[in-house]
Amino acid sequence: MYFDPDSVHTISEMMIGGELRQGTSIHPVASPSRPSLKHDIGWADATQVNDAVLAARNAFPEWSALPPRDRAKILYRFADLVDANAEEIARLESLVSARIYSESMARDVKVVSGVLRYFAEFSDKIEGSVTSTPSNSLSMTVHEPHGVVAAISPWNFPIILSSWKFAPALAAGNTVVLKPSELTPFSAVRIAQLGTEAGLPNGVFNVINGDGQVGGELVRHPDVDYVTFTGSSATGAQIMADAATTGLKPVSLELGGKGPQLVFEDAPDLDRLAAMVARGITYNSGQVCFAGSRLIVQRQLADDLTRRVADLMSELQVGPTWGDTTTMPPIINKKQNDRIAHIVEQSIRSGAELLCGGERVETAEGEFYKPTILNVSDIDNAAVCEEIFGPVLAVQTFDDFEEGVALANHSDYGLTASVHTRDISRAFKAAQDIQSGTVWINDWGRRTDFTAPFGGYKKSGLGKDMGRPGFEKYLKSKAIWLEID
C-alpha cells in the first residue's frame, strides 16, 4: 500500500481572494476505491461565486500590469512548490479519483509543474505586429489578456486538466476562478494555496467548489470574460448557452471522444500494437476522453489481434488507487458503473458479440468493471455510437482503405485517432482523411510533452489546450491605428 487513506488530511474550504472560505453547504465526497470513506467539502452559493469573481476582477489590474518576467518568476516558484509537495498532492488526487497513486506521482504532478514552467516562458513572448500601411499611417496589432477566466475541470484527470487551464491563463495575465469537479475537489485548493505561497497576489487564483449549478452561476456571471471547460459534450453545449446569457463571452471546450484505432494488415509489431490497444481502453479504467475505444482492424488481422488484446486485459489487477499492485483502478462511482453496464447490455441485445468481460468485478469495496471486448457489425450499435467512459472496446472489421477510414470517422466525435501501418503514404493519407483533432501514427496517447495542441472536431469541442494555441486563446487582439501628421 502506497499510503494509508485514513490518514490523509483534506481541506474542506475554498480559496477566495487568497483566503480559505468555508462553503455554505457541506457535502460528502466518497472515495471510489472505498465508498465508505468520505470527506466533507463545502460548496459555494451564488454569493460566494460572486465573491470569487469580484476577487479575481479586483486583482486583474495589478496582475496584468506586472512585468511579464515577474509573472514568470512567480509561476516558476509555483512549479517548484508543486514538486516539493508532490507526495501530498498525489495522495489527495488518488484519495477521491481513479488515479493510481504511482501514476499520479510519476506523471500527473510532474505535468502540473511542467505546465507551469512551460507557460511561464510564454509570459514575455506576447508579440504584436505592425501592418503595411501608407507612409503617413501606422497600424499596430497588440494582444491583451481577457480579464477573469472561469475554468471548469473534470474528475478523470483532475490536476492535469486543471493546470492546462490555469497555468496559461495566469501566464497571459488573466486572473482565474477554477471550479473543479465536485467528485475530486481536494487537490485543487491545495495547489491554489501553493500558488499564493509562491507569490500570486490575493484574488489572482481562486477555487470554488460545487456541482453543475455552481458552475452555471460562474459561467453566467457578467464579470467573467472567458470560459474554458473540459467535460461531456452535453455539458459543453449547456455551458455555451449559459455563457451567452450575459454577453457573447468566448468559450473553449474540450469534450468527449470515441477514438478509433485504425489497424491495417501490415501494422508493425503486433505485440506492441496489442499492448497499445489494451492500454488505450483500460488506462484509468477507460475513463479517458481520448481512449482508443474503437478497434477498427483489417479483417485478416482481426482474430489474432483481438486475442492478443484479450490476453493482456486478463492480466490486469483491479484494486484501490493506493494499492501497490493495482494496475486497473476503480470506476469513479456506482452511477457511472451502472451506465457502463447498461450500455454493454444494450449493445449485446442489439447484436454485439461479447468476447470477454461484460460484467462488474465483485469486490468487497469499490466499483470495478471487467475489461470488455465487443465484436460489433452494426455501426448504429451503442458500443460504437456512445462514449461509454469505461473499459469497453468495440471491434469492427474492414476490407479496404476507404471502408476503414469511413468507419474511423465517427458521426459525432473527432477528438483523437490512431493509424497503424508500415506504409507511410497510407498512414498520412488516413491521417488527412480522418476528421479528428489529433491523429497518432503507430502510437496512442498523449506524452508529457507540452508543445502539441489538443482539442477536437465536431461534438468533441472547439478551441485548443496546450501548445502555443493553448496560450494564445487567453489573449484578445486589438488594432491600433495612428495617423502621422
Image (cartoon, grey):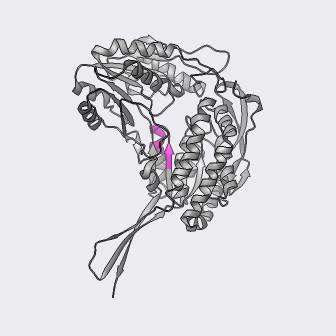
User: Can residue 191 be found in the magenta stretch?
Assistant: no
Quarter occupied by the N terminus: top right
**Percent x, y for residue 359?**
52, 14
Against 179, is 264 above or below?
Answer: above
Image quadrant in which the C terminus is located: bottom left
Give residue 39's position: percent from left, percent from top.
Answer: 73, 34
Q: Choose top left, top right, bottom left or bottom right for residue 140.
A: bottom left
* 390 lies above or below 447: above
| Residue projecting furthest to the bottom | 485
Q: What is the span of residues highlighted in magenta in the rendered image?
A: 228-238
Q: Residue at x 39, y 30 (%)?
A: 443
Q: Is residue 237 magenta?
A: yes
Residue 480, visible in the rendered structure: yes
Residue at 28 percent across and 75 percent down: it is: 133
Q: Which residue lies furthest to the right in this view?
A: 7
Task: Specify whether 320 is left or right of 11.
Answer: left
Q: Horizontal and vertical percent for residue 70?
A: 59, 63
The picture places residue 27, in percent across and down from the top left corner, at 70, 37
Q: Residue at x 24, y 25 (%)?
A: 403
Along the viewing direction, whichever of 205 and 388 lies nearer the viewer = 205
User: What's the residue at 69%, 50% (across, down)?
Assistant: 193
Q: Quadrant of residue 274?
A: top left
**Image check: 282 left or right of 479?**
right
Q: Is residue 351 visible?
A: no
